Amino acid sequence: GNFQSGAGLLVLSGVLTNSGQTLVLNGATNTLTLQYGMILGGTIAPANGAAFIVQDGTLNGVTVNGVLDVGNTYSEAVLAVTNGLTLNGSAFIGNPTNNNYGGIQFLGSQTLSGNGTVVFGASVFSPSCGNVNPNALWLANAGTTLTIGSGITVRGQNGTVGAFPSCPWYGPANVSVVNQGTISADVSGGIIN
């Protein structure tokens, strides 16, 4: 893998095999940014104000205990998920105060489990697509299913869950969502599809 570090910053652009281990990020000194890399297994535990920031990359069977930032810091951020994602914290998909947007792409039938919250940001606009409501949890493969576990809450202002067959994500339309958790369009003037 390729690691860059300095001033408490760790940037991953390669592969980190983290199976059975916990990578702890302390907000006073550490930030982890995933840039076109992959993390295999284990737990990522941002604490004390730290966030696990994704610009582009893949999580393969990972647990996130803390803040997961997909589009809050970097607009057009995309995270691919294989072998499930356990979220015990908050995943910020897009930014609530500007037009930054992001998405989590589930490759194959996947489960989003844990006791966390997905928070969609405010953006309804993509520079390349126009008004499309681009914050998303979407499936990349036809005939697959996203299962939202019983401890997961999906909320926020503007987002899409399931199929995203148009710009900017271009997933198939014939997918399924099984919601065992809570989906709440709880921000006035917002839309969750």
Image: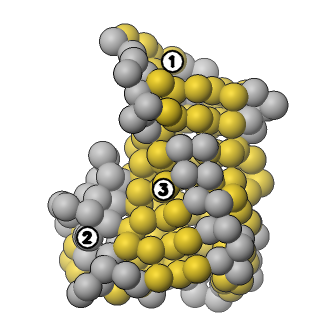
Residue at the (41%, 60%) spot, across then down: 93
Pair 3/2: label in front: 3
User: Image height check: is 7 above or below 73?
Assistant: above
The first of marks 3 and 1 along the sequence is: 1
Number of the front mark, 3 or 1: 3
Indicate the quadrant containing the C terminus: top left, top right, bottom left or bottom right. Answer: bottom left
Of badges 1 and 2, the one in the foreground is 2
Residue 74 visible in the shown view: yes
Q: Is residue 121 left or right of residue 67?
A: left
Near mark 2 (Cα within 10 A), the count class, few <14, some 14-19 or many ≥20, is: many
Residue 59 in picture, x, y percent from top left: 64, 45
The disc placed on residue 88 is none
Horizontal side of 191 relative to 129 (left or right) equals: right
Furthest residue toward front: 48
**Mark 3, secondary structure of its residue:** strand
Q: In which quarter of the view is residue 97 placed?
A: bottom left
The residue closer to the viewer here, 139 or 48, is: 48
The reply, left or right, for residue 192 in relation to residue 24 is left
- Find out whether the residues at labels 3 and 2 contact each other: C-beta distance under 8 Å: no
- Please state which of residues 173 and 7 is positioned toward the viewer in this rendering: 7
Residue type (three-letter) at the residue carrying disc 1: Phe
How far, Cα to Cα, is label 3 from label 2?
A: 16 Å
In the rendered image, residue 139, in percent from the top left (x then y), is placed at 61, 72
Q: Which residue is mark 2?
A: 123
Give me the disc on residue 91.
Answer: 3
| Amino acid of disc 2 | Ser
- Mark 1–mark 2 Cα distance, whole angstroms, equals 31 Å
* Residue pointed to by mark 1: 3
